[in-house]
Image: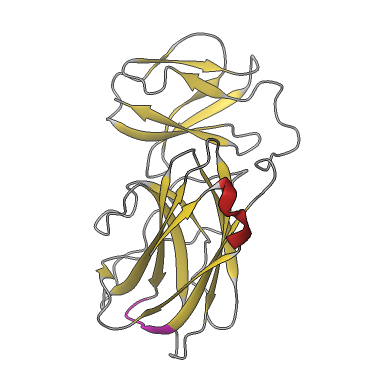
């Protein structure tokens, strides 16, 4: 199902996707690891990694898609409520930019609710969508368990994107973006930074000094530039 988000369409929120995960659903080969940290618009997190494969190795999933057609970023709250009747049923919701690759859960990863939640609990996370951005929302199950029903409620924040207290006077960001060989980090002098790959591994770290950062040897792909003091992060594309 596709949901197009537009400023004139705010009256339709909250929007509720409903679905099931029968035994005929497509499957994943591994489960995403839960780390204790829920993704939020104010504090996005890197991909948390994967749990080791289990003997059964079948994790049912379904996808839903939303598009932000507003000419500015928006924050969406994703609230997952399973209504499964199966024993051991538990679901997780995650979000991906543009497309979802079931063979590589790290590719295009943006957010997750950090818990395989069971009936009748509800577990939420939030994710920022850039202007014109498509997000694929993935509802997945624990090992080999079907689910007779769930609801995924999408709520659009109508105010400014959330901010965190004690934010530096200059928000940490990088230019040019996309980059090929060098990045210039902009922020408060002495402000710490981490550059994380899709696996959440730190590939560069230091403090803002005005000196260009050499990224020429990094693989092509998407990275997170993170302020370790606040947890705030922005995306950097390496070409």
* Image height of 210 relative to 236, above or below: above
Q: In this picture, is 91 found above or below 23?
A: above
User: Is 228 colored magenta in this rendering?
Assistant: no
Magenta segment: 143-148
Residue in front for this viewpoint, 3 or 81: 3
Question: Residue at coordinates 37% horizontally, 29% vertically from top-left?
Answer: 237
Q: Position of residue 114 (x, y in %)?
A: 52, 62
The total of numbered circles placed on residues is 0
Residue at horizontal 32 percent and vertical 15 percent from the top: 181
Question: Residue 104, position in %: x, y?
Answer: 27, 53
Q: Main secondary structure of the magenta part?
A: loop
User: Which image quadrant is residue 86 in?
Assistant: bottom left
Residue at 43% of width from left, 61% of height from top? 33
Q: Is residue 44 above or below residue 181?
A: below
Task: Name the side, left or right, on which 201 lies relative to 52.
Answer: right
- From the viewer's perspective, is 216 left or right of 176? left
x and y, in percent, of residue 238 in the image:
33, 26
């Amino acid at each position: 199902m596709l949901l197009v988000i537009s400023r004139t369409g705010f009256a339709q929120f909250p929007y509720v996707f409903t679905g099931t995960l029968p035994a005929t659903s497509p499957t994943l080969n591994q489960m995403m690891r839960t780390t204790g940290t829920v993704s939020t618009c104010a504090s996005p997190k890197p991909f948390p990694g994967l749990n080791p494969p289990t003997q059964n190795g079948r994790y049912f999933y379904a996808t839903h898609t939303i598009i932000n057609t507003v000419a500015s970023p928006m924050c969406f709250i994703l609230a997952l409520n399973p209504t499964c009747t199966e024993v051991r049923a538990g679901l997780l919701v995650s979000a991906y930019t543009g497309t979802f690759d079931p063979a590589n859960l790290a590719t295009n990863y943006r957010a997750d609710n950090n818990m395989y939640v069971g009936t009748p609990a509800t577990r939420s996370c939030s994710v920022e969508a850039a202007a014109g951005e498509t997000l694929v929302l993935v509802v997945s199950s624990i090992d080999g368990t079907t689910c007779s029903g769930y609801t995924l409620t999408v709520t659009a924040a109508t105010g400014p994107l959330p901010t965190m207290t004690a934010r530096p006077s200059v928000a940490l960001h990088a230019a040019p973006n996309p980059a090929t060989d060098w990045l210039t980090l902009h922020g408060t002098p002495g402000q710490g930074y981490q550059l994380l790959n899709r696996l959440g591994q730190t590939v560069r770290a230091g403090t803002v000094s005005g000196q260009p950062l050499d990224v020429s040897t990094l693989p092509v792909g998407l990275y997170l530039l993170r302020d370790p003091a606040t947890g705030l992060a922005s995306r950097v594309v390496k070409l």
